[in-house]
């Protein structure tokens, strides 16, 4: 069974980053039948990460543990410099903000009304495209996160996201099928089926991630994501080790 690469061991609390703290996540992953996991905490906790925790956790549990990070992409920020010199297995590039507006945080719903919805989607996807174009990321996180609160564009979302998908395909990054959207107001997996169908036609590889912020959220609704991918035609999932992509069977 493949990996869950989108796990926040430090949740929204931050360091300390210890074996004891991450252990319950590994136990939950084992109980869920996973055979490999990757921690991808938010890059705001980067300086608190202790990279010796991952091999130690692997030794204690026998579970292959990958070292990842979820990077909150901000245009103009020197991400390359921030990320350099650490032994990453993979980096997830995610857009959570437009300017200073962290649109995915609770309490930010009113901000959606300040925008023309198509313009908002276009602006959001242009940021995703810029993130992919940096070539820094092995995985693009929750591609259509902008739908989180259920505000839908007037134009077909495929038209609005199409250019970003072309750039992701050119960058060689994988797309993440993220089940956390099922637990948000939108109540859907990220990304939408039509976006995954385009991704498949562009030969973009995929991973499945739970975006767990607690052990009990690991691998949640994974079966639904697998079935969606299988119906679209995907037969392989991407895996990562030291920045290199490999694939393994979806089932
Ligand atoms: Zn995220
Ligand atoms: Zn996340």
Image: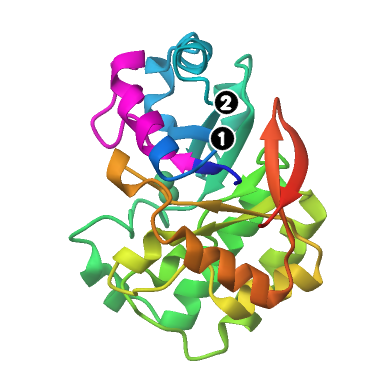
Mark 2 and mark 1 residues within 8 Å of each other at the beta carbon: yes
Residue 73, numbered label = none
Could you tell me residue 195's position as x and y percent?
Answer: 63, 74
The residue under label 2 is 64
Q: Quadrant of residue 206?
A: bottom right
**Can residue 221 be seen in this snapshot?**
yes
The C terminus is located in which quarter?
A: bottom right
Look at the numbered disc 2 and give the secondary structure of its residue. Answer: loop
Whole-number angstrom distance, CA of label 2 to CA of label 1: 5 Å
Q: Is residue 248 magenta?
A: no
Please state if 160 lies on the left or on the right of 238 as rendered: left
Q: Colour mode?
A: rainbow
State which region is magenta: 6-29
The residue under label 1 is 36
Which is nearer the eye, 199 or 163?
199
Q: Is mark 1 within 8 Å of ligand 2?
A: no
**Can residue 72 be seen in this snapshot?**
no
Using a 10 Å C-alpha cutoff, classify the residue at mark 1 as few (fewer than 14 neighbours), some (14 to 19) or many (20 or more): many
Could you tell me residue 151's position as x and y percent?
Answer: 35, 80
Look at the numbered disc 1 and give the secondary structure of its residue. Answer: loop
Q: Is mark 2 within 8 Å of ligand 2?
A: no
């Amino acid at each position: 069974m493949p990996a869950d690469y989108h796990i926040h061991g430090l949740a929204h609390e931050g360091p300390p980053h210890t074996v004891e703290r991450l252990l319950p996540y590994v136990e939950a992953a084992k109980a869920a039948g996973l055979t490999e996991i990757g921690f991808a905490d938010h890059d705001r906790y980067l300086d608190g990460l202790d990279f010796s925790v991952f091999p130690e956790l692997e030794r204690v549990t026998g579970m292959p543990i990958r070292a990842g990070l979820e990077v909150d992409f901000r245009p103009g920020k020197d991400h390359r410099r921030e990320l350099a010199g650490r032994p990453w297995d993979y980096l997830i590039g995610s857009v959570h903000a437009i300017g200073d507006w962290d649109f995915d945080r609770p309490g930010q719903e009113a901000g959606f009304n300040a925008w023309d919805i198509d313009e908002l989607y276009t602006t959001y996807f242009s940021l995703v495209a810029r993130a992919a174009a940096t070539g820094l990321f092995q995985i693009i996180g929750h591609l259509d996160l902008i739908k989180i609160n259920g505000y839908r564009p007037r134009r077909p979302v495929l038209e609005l996201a199409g250019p970003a998908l072309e750039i992701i395909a050119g960058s060689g990054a994988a797309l993440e099928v993220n089940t956390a959207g099922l637990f948000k107001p939108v109540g859907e997996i990220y990304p939408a089926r039509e976006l995954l169908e385009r991704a498949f036609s562009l030969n973009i590889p995929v991973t499945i991630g739970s975006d767990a912020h607690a052990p009990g959220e690991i691998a949640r609704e994974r079966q639904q994501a697998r079935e969606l991918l299988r119906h679209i035609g995907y037969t392989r999932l991407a895996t990562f080790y030291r920045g290199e992509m490999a694939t393994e069977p979806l089932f």
